[in-house]
């Protein structure tokens, strides 16, 4: 969704930013571009018409505040109205009881089990140690899938594949984890027409008494998300919604707007396949990225999550002293990998994401991974003393890494250029485009 809808809206904003005259004709043209982009992303046409009318009315009738040009004010109006479309304020998960019980709901195939894994990872980063209870007695291997996910993260799991009574499983899970701070309950995939499953959900809800019923909706279903949300809300008090699969769906706009329209709070979104591709849904941040304005706040938070402070201090000291080594660069690459796909990171930098083609960002990730393999074939002495890597050592490293000798030379060239750029940043700060030149090396 960020690719399709985001590209269209970013182009509209760029066109608007380049216009010298902002008159009625210009505004109507911009509004038509926005309508086209939203309709192509499966947003309900009535909602699109309401939104575009508000944008047009405000743009034609409101006077810009002092110090803001008409063009800047129209951009602000588009941003504000699109944020309001998705709910305006972010909704945090407030864990205030012990045990805090979260019951997951959703159709089979919506990504519910994977989302449980992502939420567990998210909570672990916040310092919590959640436990999981499997009550899905309908889907084959549901317990095994949860077991694989939770074992990786060392999270406690209760379930019994032989027990086909979901309510009994929930009761036993409550007893098993009565001293746990957070308990997450997985339930069977639901469908609004399957009355027996909806009845089971009611029974589970009365036994579990969840503090939060979290509904998982597949972003690829578009406007149908609204009907799903209504069906679940009529059966259980849905406290929050997670929209999944927003990384590759043109219908993501339909899902988000349909759910937002009925007033259900979207608390999280899934933006990829990795466990870390999961974020708190903030309408302001999300729309900023869609309009090509970046999302520096999320980028900073990602950095804070993955950066080892001791390593960061050591690297900064090395940079300032001019003693930046290949070992320091290896540490940097490890932290970059943890942050997620490069294209996702670039989209958070204002004005940068749309300039980088998908192929180039993939090439960046491929290069980082190749460089890491090459560095793993180096000795600690070579990493700390790159000047010692002459022809014979380079040949040994390339054979050990299974790459060409030219690849090792390319890495050493990148290292030397990086060292120069970092020394420049250390002396002058971020001015002069040093960081841009540093990133640019990957794009060649």
Image (tube, helix red, strand yellow):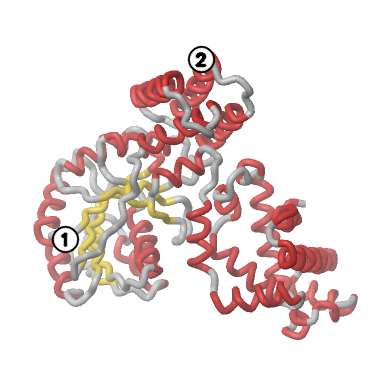
Q: Residues within 10 Å of mark 1 (few under 14, many from 20)?
A: many
| Number of dots carrying numbers | 2
Q: Nearer the viewer, residue 218 or 38?
A: 38
Which residue in the structure is indicated by mark 2?
Answer: 24
Which residue in the structure is indicated by mark 1?
Answer: 166
The picture quadrant where one finds residue 388 is bottom right
| SS under mark 2 | helix
Is 91 situated above or below 71?
Answer: below
Is 330 situated above or below 3?
Answer: below
| SS under mark 1 | helix
- The answer to whether 304 appears left or right of 145 in the picture is right
Where residue 30 appears, as percent x and y from the top left, is 52, 22
Residue at 85 percent across and 78 percent down: it is 387
Q: CA distance from mark 2 to mark 1?
A: 61 Å
Q: Nearer the viewer, residue 144 or 264?
A: 264
> In the rendered image, is residue 407 in sight?
no
**Label 2 vs 1, first from the N-terminus:** 2
Q: Nearer the viewer, residue 235 or 440?
A: 440
Where residue 186 appears, as percent x and y from the top left, is 26, 59
Residue placed furthest toward the top: 25
Residue at 54 percent across and 70 percent down: it is 307
The picture quadrant where one finds residue 364 is bottom right
Of the two numbered discs 2 and 1 in the rendering, the one whose residue sits closer to the viewer? 2
Where residue 194 appears, as percent x and y from the top left, is 18, 42
Is 406 situated above or below 195?
Answer: below
Residue at 14 percent across and 74 percent down: it is 175
Q: Are marks 2 and 1 in contact (CB under 8 Å)?
A: no
> In the rendered image, is residue 157 in sight?
yes
Where residue 114 appears, as percent x and y from the top left, is 38, 58
- The answer to whether 442 appears left or right of 299 in the picture is right
């Amino acid at each position: 969704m960020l690719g399709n809808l985001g590209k269209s809206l970013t182009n509209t904003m760029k066109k608007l930013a380049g216009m010298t005259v902002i008159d009625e004709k210009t505004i109507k043209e911009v509004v038509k571009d926005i309508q086209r982009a939203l309709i192509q992303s499966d947003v309900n046409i009535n909602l699109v018409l309401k939104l575009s009318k508000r944008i047009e009315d405000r743009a034609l009738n409101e006077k810009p505040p002092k110090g803001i040009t008409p063009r800047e004010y129209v951009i602000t109006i588009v941003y504000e109205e699109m944020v309001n479309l998705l709910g305006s304020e972010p909704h945090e998960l407030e864990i205030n009881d012990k045990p805090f019980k979260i019951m997951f709901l959703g159709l089979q195939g919506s990504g519910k089990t994977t989302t449980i894994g992502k939420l567990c990872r998210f909570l672990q980063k916040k310092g919590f140690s959640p436990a999981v209870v499997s009550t899905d007695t309908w889907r084959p291997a549901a317990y095994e899938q949860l077991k694989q996910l939770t074992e990786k993260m060392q999270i406690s799991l209760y379930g019994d594949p032989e027990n086909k009574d979901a309510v009994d499983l929930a009761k036993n899970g409550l007893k098993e984890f009565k001293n746990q701070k957070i308990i997450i309950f997985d339930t069977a995939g639901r469908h609004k027409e399957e009355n027996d499953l909806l009845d089971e959900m009611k029974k589970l809800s009365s036994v579990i008494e969840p503090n939060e019923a979290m509904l998982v909706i597949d972003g690829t279903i578009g406007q149908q998300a609204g009907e799903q949300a209504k069906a679940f809300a009529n059966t259980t008090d849905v406290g929050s919604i997670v929209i999944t699969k927003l990384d590759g769906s043109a219908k993501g706009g339909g899902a988000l707007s349909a759910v937002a329209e009925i007033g259900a709070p979207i608390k999280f979104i899934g933006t990829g396949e990795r466990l870390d591709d999961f974020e708190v849904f903030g309408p302001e941040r999300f729309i900023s990225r869609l309009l090509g304005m970046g999302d520096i706040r999320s980028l900073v938070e990602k950095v804070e999550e993955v950066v080892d402070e001791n390593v960061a201090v050591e690297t900064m000291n090395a940079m300032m002293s001019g003693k930046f080594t290949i070992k320091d660069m290896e540490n940097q690459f490890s932290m970059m990998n943890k942050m997620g796909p490069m294209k996702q990171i670039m989209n958070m930098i204002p004005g940068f994401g749309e300039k980088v083609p998908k192929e180039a960002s993939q090439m960046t990730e491929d290069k980082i991974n190749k460089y890491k393999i090459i560095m793993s074939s180096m000795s600690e002495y070579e990493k700390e003393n790159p000047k010692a890597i002459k022809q014979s050592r380079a040949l040994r490293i390339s054979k050990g890494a299974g790459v060409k000798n030219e690849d090792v030379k390319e890495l050493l060239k990148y290292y030397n250029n990086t060292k120069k750029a970092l020394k420049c940043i250390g002396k002058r700060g971020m001015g002069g485009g040093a960081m841009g030149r540093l990133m640019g090396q990957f794009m060649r």
